[in-house]
Amino acid sequence: MRYNAEMTANLENDFSKSDLHDLIIAKSRLEHPGLAARLADLVGKPINRGLKALPPGWNEKAIQIARKALLKALDIAIGTLGSGNRGRSRDRLHRVLVAGSGFAGGAVGMAAIPLEIPISTTIMLRSIADIARDEGQDISLIETRLSCLEVFALGGRSSWDDSVEEGYWVVRTALARSVSQAAAYIGKRGLAEESAPPIVRLITTIASRFSAVITDEMAAKAVPIIGAFAGGAINFVFMQHFQQMARGHFVIKRLEDRYGTARVEEIYREIPVDEFK
Protein backbone atom coordinates (compact mmCIF):
# COMPACT_ATOMS: atom_id res chain seq x y z
CA MET A 1 0.00 0.00 0.00
CA ARG A 2 1.52 3.31 -1.15
CA TYR A 3 0.65 6.80 -0.08
CA ASN A 4 2.78 9.86 -0.64
CA ALA A 5 4.53 11.82 2.08
CA GLU A 6 2.79 15.10 1.24
CA MET A 7 -0.68 13.59 1.71
CA THR A 8 0.41 11.99 4.98
CA ALA A 9 1.88 15.25 6.31
CA ASN A 10 -1.25 17.22 5.45
CA LEU A 11 -3.59 14.76 7.12
CA GLU A 12 -1.52 14.09 10.22
CA ASN A 13 -2.28 17.58 11.53
CA ASP A 14 -5.28 16.03 13.29
CA PHE A 15 -5.13 12.37 12.18
CA SER A 16 -2.48 10.03 13.56
CA LYS A 17 -0.30 8.06 11.17
CA SER A 18 -1.64 4.73 12.44
CA ASP A 19 -5.25 5.88 12.09
CA LEU A 20 -4.55 7.12 8.57
CA HIS A 21 -3.08 3.74 7.70
CA ASP A 22 -6.15 2.00 9.14
CA LEU A 23 -8.43 4.24 7.07
CA ILE A 24 -6.51 3.50 3.87
CA ILE A 25 -6.79 -0.24 4.52
CA ALA A 26 -10.50 0.16 5.33
CA LYS A 27 -11.13 1.96 2.03
CA SER A 28 -9.25 -0.72 0.10
CA ARG A 29 -11.52 -3.34 1.66
CA LEU A 30 -14.77 -1.47 1.13
CA GLU A 31 -14.22 -0.21 -2.39
CA HIS A 32 -12.38 -3.22 -3.84
CA PRO A 33 -13.83 -6.36 -2.23
CA GLY A 34 -12.75 -8.69 -5.08
CA LEU A 35 -15.60 -11.17 -4.59
CA ALA A 36 -16.03 -11.93 -8.29
CA ALA A 37 -12.36 -12.80 -8.74
CA ARG A 38 -12.39 -15.10 -5.72
CA LEU A 39 -15.45 -16.96 -6.97
CA ALA A 40 -14.03 -17.25 -10.48
CA ASP A 41 -10.80 -18.68 -9.07
CA LEU A 42 -12.73 -21.16 -6.95
CA VAL A 43 -15.20 -22.38 -9.55
CA GLY A 44 -12.66 -22.30 -12.35
CA LYS A 45 -14.88 -20.68 -14.97
CA PRO A 46 -16.88 -17.45 -15.31
CA ILE A 47 -19.93 -17.36 -13.07
CA ASN A 48 -21.81 -15.84 -16.00
CA ARG A 49 -22.30 -19.42 -17.18
CA GLY A 50 -23.90 -20.21 -13.86
CA LEU A 51 -26.23 -17.24 -14.27
CA LYS A 52 -27.51 -18.73 -17.51
CA ALA A 53 -28.22 -22.01 -15.71
CA LEU A 54 -30.45 -20.41 -13.09
CA PRO A 55 -34.20 -21.10 -13.38
CA PRO A 56 -36.68 -18.46 -14.61
CA GLY A 57 -37.53 -15.83 -12.00
CA TRP A 58 -34.24 -16.31 -10.13
CA ASN A 59 -33.89 -12.57 -9.48
CA GLU A 60 -37.26 -12.36 -7.67
CA LYS A 61 -36.41 -15.55 -5.83
CA ALA A 62 -33.10 -14.09 -4.66
CA ILE A 63 -34.90 -11.02 -3.27
CA GLN A 64 -37.38 -13.24 -1.41
CA ILE A 65 -34.53 -15.29 0.07
CA ALA A 66 -32.67 -12.10 1.02
CA ARG A 67 -35.70 -10.69 2.84
CA LYS A 68 -36.27 -13.93 4.75
CA ALA A 69 -32.60 -14.18 5.71
CA LEU A 70 -32.41 -10.55 6.82
CA LEU A 71 -35.59 -10.75 8.91
CA LYS A 72 -34.11 -13.75 10.69
CA ALA A 73 -30.82 -11.91 11.11
CA LEU A 74 -32.65 -8.84 12.46
CA ASP A 75 -34.39 -11.00 15.04
CA ILE A 76 -31.01 -12.47 16.07
CA ALA A 77 -29.38 -9.03 16.09
CA ILE A 78 -31.93 -7.55 18.46
CA GLY A 79 -32.40 -10.56 20.68
CA THR A 80 -29.26 -12.63 21.11
CA LEU A 81 -26.04 -10.92 20.05
CA GLY A 82 -24.83 -10.69 23.64
CA SER A 83 -23.14 -8.00 25.69
CA GLY A 84 -21.05 -5.04 24.70
CA ASN A 85 -17.84 -6.50 26.11
CA ARG A 86 -14.87 -6.16 23.80
CA GLY A 87 -13.08 -9.31 22.68
CA ARG A 88 -11.01 -10.72 19.84
CA SER A 89 -13.09 -11.66 16.81
CA ARG A 90 -13.24 -15.38 16.01
CA ASP A 91 -12.99 -15.04 12.24
CA ARG A 92 -11.65 -18.54 11.57
CA LEU A 93 -14.30 -20.23 13.71
CA HIS A 94 -17.11 -18.50 11.86
CA ARG A 95 -15.57 -19.39 8.49
CA VAL A 96 -15.53 -23.04 9.51
CA LEU A 97 -19.15 -22.88 10.70
CA VAL A 98 -20.45 -21.22 7.55
CA ALA A 99 -18.45 -23.62 5.39
CA GLY A 100 -20.16 -26.48 7.22
CA SER A 101 -23.53 -24.93 6.40
CA GLY A 102 -22.54 -24.68 2.75
CA PHE A 103 -21.23 -28.25 2.75
CA ALA A 104 -24.59 -29.53 3.95
CA GLY A 105 -26.48 -27.37 1.46
CA GLY A 106 -24.17 -28.34 -1.39
CA ALA A 107 -24.84 -32.01 -0.76
CA VAL A 108 -28.54 -31.39 -1.39
CA GLY A 109 -28.09 -28.97 -4.29
CA MET A 110 -29.81 -25.78 -5.44
CA ALA A 111 -33.05 -26.78 -3.72
CA ALA A 112 -31.37 -26.25 -0.33
CA ILE A 113 -30.51 -22.58 -0.93
CA PRO A 114 -33.75 -21.09 0.52
CA LEU A 115 -33.11 -23.00 3.75
CA GLU A 116 -29.33 -22.69 3.83
CA ILE A 117 -29.01 -18.94 3.15
CA PRO A 118 -30.82 -17.83 6.38
CA ILE A 119 -28.59 -20.16 8.40
CA SER A 120 -25.35 -18.94 6.81
CA THR A 121 -26.52 -15.31 7.07
CA THR A 122 -27.07 -15.73 10.81
CA ILE A 123 -23.55 -17.15 11.21
CA MET A 124 -22.16 -14.25 9.18
CA LEU A 125 -24.04 -11.77 11.36
CA ARG A 126 -22.47 -13.22 14.49
CA SER A 127 -19.04 -12.88 12.90
CA ILE A 128 -19.82 -9.27 11.94
CA ALA A 129 -20.86 -8.55 15.55
CA ASP A 130 -17.59 -10.12 16.75
CA ILE A 131 -15.66 -7.75 14.50
CA ALA A 132 -17.70 -4.77 15.75
CA ARG A 133 -16.78 -5.68 19.32
CA ASP A 134 -13.13 -6.15 18.32
CA GLU A 135 -13.14 -2.59 16.96
CA GLY A 136 -14.48 -1.23 20.24
CA GLN A 137 -18.17 -0.87 19.37
CA ASP A 138 -20.81 -1.39 22.08
CA ILE A 139 -22.87 -4.28 20.73
CA SER A 140 -25.51 -3.80 23.42
CA LEU A 141 -26.73 -0.67 21.60
CA ILE A 142 -29.56 -1.01 19.07
CA GLU A 143 -27.76 1.35 16.70
CA THR A 144 -24.63 -0.83 16.72
CA ARG A 145 -26.65 -3.98 16.12
CA LEU A 146 -28.34 -2.39 13.12
CA SER A 147 -24.91 -1.29 11.89
CA CYS A 148 -24.00 -4.98 11.89
CA LEU A 149 -27.00 -5.69 9.68
CA GLU A 150 -25.98 -2.74 7.49
CA VAL A 151 -22.85 -4.66 6.44
CA PHE A 152 -24.97 -6.93 4.23
CA ALA A 153 -25.82 -3.88 2.11
CA LEU A 154 -22.25 -2.60 2.07
CA GLY A 155 -21.10 -5.91 0.67
CA GLY A 156 -24.04 -6.22 -1.66
CA ARG A 157 -22.79 -4.58 -4.82
CA SER A 158 -23.36 -6.90 -7.77
CA SER A 159 -20.05 -8.57 -8.51
CA TRP A 160 -20.82 -8.80 -12.21
CA ASP A 161 -22.07 -5.28 -12.92
CA ASP A 162 -19.05 -3.11 -13.62
CA SER A 163 -21.33 -0.14 -14.29
CA VAL A 164 -22.31 0.10 -10.64
CA GLU A 165 -20.40 2.97 -9.02
CA GLU A 166 -21.95 3.13 -5.58
CA GLY A 167 -19.21 3.78 -3.07
CA TYR A 168 -19.25 3.21 0.68
CA TRP A 169 -20.50 6.67 1.66
CA VAL A 170 -23.24 6.64 -0.97
CA VAL A 171 -24.64 3.43 0.53
CA ARG A 172 -24.21 4.72 4.10
CA THR A 173 -26.15 7.86 3.20
CA ALA A 174 -28.92 5.87 1.52
CA LEU A 175 -29.28 3.66 4.59
CA ALA A 176 -28.95 6.35 7.27
CA ARG A 177 -32.59 7.39 7.47
CA SER A 178 -33.91 3.81 7.43
CA VAL A 179 -31.45 2.73 10.12
CA SER A 180 -32.29 5.72 12.32
CA GLN A 181 -36.05 5.21 12.03
CA ALA A 182 -35.79 1.45 12.62
CA ALA A 183 -33.60 2.00 15.69
CA ALA A 184 -36.10 4.47 17.16
CA TYR A 185 -39.03 2.14 16.47
CA ILE A 186 -37.31 -0.96 17.88
CA GLY A 187 -36.13 0.98 20.91
CA LYS A 188 -39.75 1.79 21.77
CA ARG A 189 -41.66 -1.29 20.61
CA GLY A 190 -39.18 -4.07 19.92
CA LEU A 191 -39.72 -6.44 17.00
CA ALA A 192 -43.34 -7.30 17.77
CA GLU A 193 -44.40 -6.11 14.31
CA GLU A 194 -41.98 -7.01 11.53
CA SER A 195 -44.45 -5.47 9.05
CA ALA A 196 -44.11 -2.01 10.65
CA PRO A 197 -43.06 0.58 8.03
CA PRO A 198 -39.64 1.41 9.60
CA ILE A 199 -38.71 -2.30 9.69
CA VAL A 200 -40.00 -2.93 6.16
CA ARG A 201 -38.04 0.04 4.76
CA LEU A 202 -34.80 -1.08 6.37
CA ILE A 203 -35.09 -4.71 5.29
CA THR A 204 -36.20 -3.77 1.77
CA THR A 205 -33.28 -1.38 1.31
CA ILE A 206 -30.68 -3.89 2.51
CA ALA A 207 -32.31 -6.81 0.66
CA SER A 208 -32.16 -4.96 -2.65
CA ARG A 209 -28.35 -5.10 -2.41
CA PHE A 210 -27.88 -8.34 -0.48
CA SER A 211 -29.92 -10.20 -3.11
CA ALA A 212 -27.16 -9.46 -5.65
CA VAL A 213 -24.74 -11.43 -3.50
CA ILE A 214 -27.25 -14.27 -3.13
CA THR A 215 -27.61 -14.32 -6.91
CA ASP A 216 -23.83 -14.69 -7.20
CA GLU A 217 -23.95 -17.61 -4.77
CA MET A 218 -26.81 -19.24 -6.67
CA ALA A 219 -24.89 -18.78 -9.92
CA ALA A 220 -21.73 -20.29 -8.48
CA LYS A 221 -23.61 -23.30 -7.17
CA ALA A 222 -25.34 -23.71 -10.54
CA VAL A 223 -21.99 -24.45 -12.20
CA PRO A 224 -21.93 -28.24 -12.82
CA ILE A 225 -18.82 -29.04 -10.77
CA ILE A 226 -20.40 -27.78 -7.56
CA GLY A 227 -21.09 -30.38 -4.91
CA ALA A 228 -20.91 -30.63 -1.15
CA PHE A 229 -17.22 -29.71 -0.92
CA ALA A 230 -17.47 -26.77 -3.33
CA GLY A 231 -20.66 -25.59 -1.62
CA GLY A 232 -18.72 -25.29 1.61
CA ALA A 233 -15.83 -23.54 -0.15
CA ILE A 234 -18.18 -20.98 -1.71
CA ASN A 235 -19.68 -20.19 1.69
CA PHE A 236 -16.15 -19.81 3.04
CA VAL A 237 -15.42 -17.21 0.34
CA PHE A 238 -18.64 -15.33 1.12
CA MET A 239 -17.78 -15.28 4.82
CA GLN A 240 -14.36 -13.82 4.03
CA HIS A 241 -16.07 -11.21 1.85
CA PHE A 242 -18.44 -10.01 4.59
CA GLN A 243 -15.75 -10.16 7.26
CA GLN A 244 -13.72 -7.84 5.05
CA MET A 245 -16.69 -5.49 4.65
CA ALA A 246 -17.33 -5.57 8.40
CA ARG A 247 -13.72 -4.85 9.30
CA GLY A 248 -13.60 -1.83 7.00
CA HIS A 249 -16.99 -0.57 8.21
CA PHE A 250 -16.21 -0.79 11.90
CA VAL A 251 -12.71 0.62 11.55
CA ILE A 252 -14.43 3.68 10.10
CA LYS A 253 -16.98 3.66 12.94
CA ARG A 254 -14.08 3.57 15.44
CA LEU A 255 -12.39 6.51 13.73
CA GLU A 256 -15.69 8.43 13.62
CA ASP A 257 -15.91 8.10 17.41
CA ARG A 258 -12.51 9.76 17.63
CA TYR A 259 -12.53 12.37 14.86
CA GLY A 260 -16.18 12.81 13.88
CA THR A 261 -18.00 11.50 10.82
CA ALA A 262 -17.46 14.59 8.66
CA ARG A 263 -13.68 14.57 9.10
CA VAL A 264 -13.34 10.82 8.50
CA GLU A 265 -15.45 11.04 5.35
CA GLU A 266 -13.41 14.00 4.12
CA ILE A 267 -10.11 12.14 4.52
CA TYR A 268 -11.58 8.92 3.12
CA ARG A 269 -12.54 10.74 -0.07
CA GLU A 270 -9.05 12.30 -0.33
CA ILE A 271 -7.38 8.88 -0.45
CA PRO A 272 -6.70 8.23 -4.16
CA VAL A 273 -8.08 5.09 -5.73
CA ASP A 274 -4.70 4.22 -7.22
CA GLU A 275 -3.45 3.52 -3.70
CA PHE A 276 -5.05 0.09 -4.08
CA LYS A 277 -3.43 -0.93 -7.36
Image: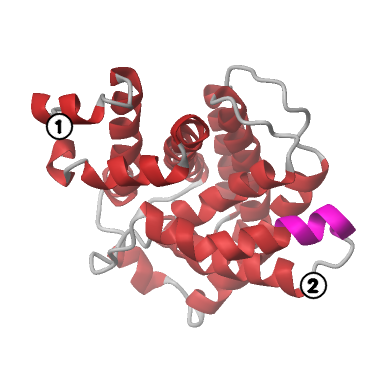
Q: Residue at x 61, y 30 (%)?
A: 137
Amino acid bearing label 1 = Met
Q: Residue at x 60, y 44 (%)?
A: 148
Residue 248 coordinates in the image, percent (x, y): 42, 37
**Labels 1, 2: front one:** 1
Give the magenta range.
Answer: 183-191
Which of the marked residues, 1 or 2, is nearer the chain's N terminus?
1
Q: Secondary structure at mark 1?
A: helix
In this view, 170 is above or below 126: below
In this view, 97 is above or below 69: above
Q: Residue at x 50, y 31 (%)?
A: 254
Amino acid bearing label 2 = Ala
Residue 43 can be seen, yes or no = no
Residue 130 coordinates in the image, percent (x, y): 61, 29
Q: Secondary structure at mark 2?
A: loop
Q: Quadrant of residue 252?
A: top left
Residue 140 coordinates in the image, percent (x, y): 75, 35
Numbered tag placed on residue 196 in the rendering: 2
Q: Quadrant of residue 99?
A: top right
Given residues 46 and 237, the one toward you in this image is: 237
Prevailing secondary structure class for the magenta stretch in the rendered image = helix
Given residues 144 and 75, the one toward you in this image is: 144
Q: Give the total of numbered labels.
A: 2
| Residue on which the image places disc 1 | 7
